[in-house]
Amino acid sequence: MGRRKPDVLFWIVAAYSLVVVACVSWLDAWCFFEFWNPLRWGVAAIYLTLALPLLSSKPSRAVVCGSLIWMLALLPQMRWNHAKSFYVDARRLELGMESAEVRKIMAPHLELGATYHPTSEEQEWLPLPPDPRYAMIFIHCAIGWTDHCEVRLDAGGRVRNIHIEKD
């Protein structure tokens, strides 16, 4: 008996998945999903809804499952560039962390007033450096208005609020 011909639906699912994964990866590299993280889940739901009628074989289901794992679990952790790395690090911050832990995680980025002192021109568009006893502001670059992460501390120096701002 000869080899079985590949299922045509499998190749349709594979091509569809490749296009969707490539587009989502490209958007992720440009920090598109950082505007509103649930948007990533919405794209995955649409992808799955459109793929469901084509899932007649195990290989097709494996391709879709792998694509969903890539889009929802692996892609948010990818460090495509410095801006995306900033978001990955900022999302690692947790309430209750000590300020030293925050600074260790955010070390690759600029902290206003501590590791980076804005020039008078930059002070027009950058937030003012806060009192380090009560807050920290991190930016990923000093060129133009930039994404930043504001970390508010309680009286004991632990994180009480985290706000990530997309430019």
Image (cartoon, rainbow, N blue to C red):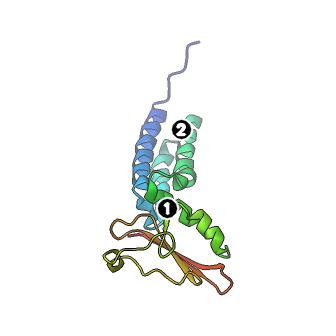
Q: Where in the figure is residue 77, as x and y percent of width and height?
A: 55, 54
Q: Which of 3 and 47 is in front in this view?
A: 47
Q: Mark 2 points at which residue?
A: 60
Q: Nearer the viewer, residue 112 or 86?
A: 112
Classify 10 Å Cα crowding around label 2: few (below 14), some (14-19), many (20 and above).
Answer: many
The nearer-to-camera label among 2 and 1 is 1
64 versus 59 height, above or below: below
- Residue 159, located in which quarter of the rendered image? bottom right
Write the residue at 46% across / 80% down: 129
Kindly indicate the quadrant of the structure image that contains residue 118.
bottom left
**Residue type, numbered disc 2:** Ser
SS state under label 2: helix
Corner quadrant of residue 96: bottom right
As drawn, which residue projects farthest toward the top? 1
On screen, residue 103 above or below 84: below
Disc number for residue 29: none
Which residue sits furthest bottom? Answer: 155
Separation of disc 2 and disc 1 at Cα? 35 Å
Kind of residue indicated by mark 1: Phe
Instruction: Please state the horizontal and vertical placement of residue 154, each as a whole percent of the image.
Output: 64, 85
**Element marked by disc 1:** helix
The image quadrant where one finds the N terminus is top right
Quarter the C terminus occupies? bottom left
Query: What residue lies at 57% left-to-right and 45% top-to-bottom?
Result: 65
Query: Residue at point 34% right, 74% down?
Result: 122
Camera sees residue 118:
yes
Q: Residue 22, percent across and down? A: 42, 45
Residue 86, numbered label:
1
Point out residue 117 in the picture as x, y percentages from the top left corner.
Answer: 43, 73
Question: Taking 50 as reference, is 143 left or right?
Answer: left
